[in-house]
Image: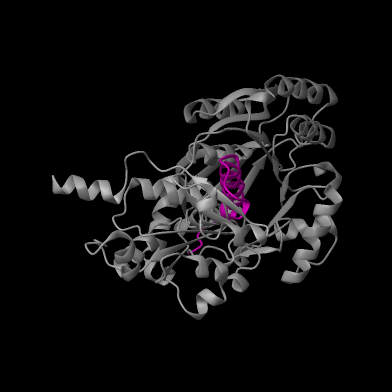
Amino acid sequence: MVESKNILVIGDVMLDTYYTGDVKRISPEAPVPVFRKKKERSVLGGAANVAANLIAADQNVSMMSMVGNDETGEKLKNMFREQGINADLIFPTDRHTTEKIRFLASNNQQVLRLDIEDTDPLSSENCAEMLKALEQKIDSFDIILLSDYLKGLLTYDFTQGVIRLAKEKDIPVVIDIKDPRSEKYAGATLLKPNKKELQDITGLSCDTDEEIILASEALRTSCRCDYVLTTCGARGMVLVGDGEPYFIEAYGQEVYDVTGAGDTTIAYLAACISNGYSLRKAINIANLAAGIQVSKVGTSSVYWHEIRERMSEQAQGAVHKIISGKTVKSFRKDHASSKIVFTNGCFDILHIGHIRYLQEAAALGDILIVGLNSDASVKRLKGPERPINSQAERAEMLGALGFVDYVTIFDEDTPLELIKTIQPDILVKGQDYAPEQVVGKKEVEERGGKLVLVPFVEGKSTTNIIEKMKK
């Protein structure tokens, strides 16, 4: 689904250690439970968990942070090496490496958390040293992700220094924020607070959707950033800065543990943005990844194969993607804030050329709707022996593709009337067409939209498949 891009994660790293055991009695020394430890495991935490999720998302990841000259710091660096995270920009300091130890009893109930950490701010000398090192390597990164846990690394000077270097190279910067001092994040591409953080940083109420939008716009203005994506727990997420505010409901999944959900969200968001996905499609995937994350216990990673499996499950409702009648007539109104992509065809025998063509089309916007020639239309265009598959079967197969959002069948020889009704922002056809030959080009461009010609896979077509079967 994505290519491996070079992503730099900068932020407070920590070791998340889990003691699992049981509590069956109260201590005779004091009225406290006695925890009997059975097992122990450690995983990457904080910004390091963001890096781990990016590795799970098949990205090339470098980590920039500081760790102490202690056993925990060495353990972290070893884990970076084991997971394939480049640690060349990890700087040693005379401080404790942050470790969070969680005690889990029966049914993974957390009974205590022990934090070992220093939160002294990065010194001016270390700040200058780290920025100099970043300046020497910044050209190799496609996107920079900052994960602020307020443990001392992301000071005002260091954060602003990173943003300045990135802007000089036109590299996007996305930040998972914590600090209520908004000036620290000024100039970033995208800021991701949760609802409480948004309220703290703006001083505005965030109880209703309208208040969240107003606070998000206030933060975007004060920080001079392009976008603000606010996560609202079970209510989902809201994006401002990309046209009309975009709401997405939380992915329906049983919640076991919200630990690390924000790390997973920002990781998949960065992976998708660096791969050229539209922002709204990137948010949809990040939301799905977060939903998978909360179904797991403790800090953990979400893998692309899990995303694909969930998309496949969603595609089981393929027939519900097939729309007609009033739904088509109100489509533009119902999706007024979305970038709609439209393409059309017979799609008689679905093959790899179709799949790659539709994937490229889907990546151009937020919603991909496919106009499908009816059986009668195909016969008029292709001859009496076509189609091989009925319109119902062809529509259901297209709907089963996770990257196809809607399918509608049209009976005319061309989709011109359908295009006029749907009013897409982007019209997609194959490069075997000359632009002036594409039906609907004029109507789309008159509305401010555009035509995109996508290359077909050489030698792959329904006609070729049929001819090969006849031999």
Is residue 31 in sight in this rendering? Answer: no
- Give the side of residue 465 with respect to residue 147, left or right: left
**For residue 167, what is the image quadrant?**
top right
Residue lying at 36% horizontally and 60% vertically, measured from the top left: 346
The residue segment tinted magenta is 254-283
Q: Position of residue 379 (x, y in %)?
A: 29, 65
Q: Position of residue 94 (x, y in %)?
A: 73, 23
Q: Nearer the viewer, residue 315 or 354?
A: 354
Would you say residue 172 sits in the magenta stretch?
Answer: no
**For residue 322, what is the image quadrant?**
bottom left
Q: Is residue 71 above or below residue 340?
A: above
Q: Is residue 157 above or below residue 1?
A: above
- Give the side of residue 286 with respect to residue 462, left or right: right
Q: Position of residue 249 (x, y in %)?
A: 58, 66
Residue lying at 53% horizontally and 41% vertically, measured from the top left: 53
Is residue 291 in sight in this rendering? Answer: yes
Q: Is residue 455 above or below residue 443?
A: above
In the rendered image, the quadrant that contains the N terminus is top left
Main SS of the magenta segment?
A: helix
Would you say residue 266 sits in the magenta stretch?
Answer: yes
Number of dots carrying numbers: 0
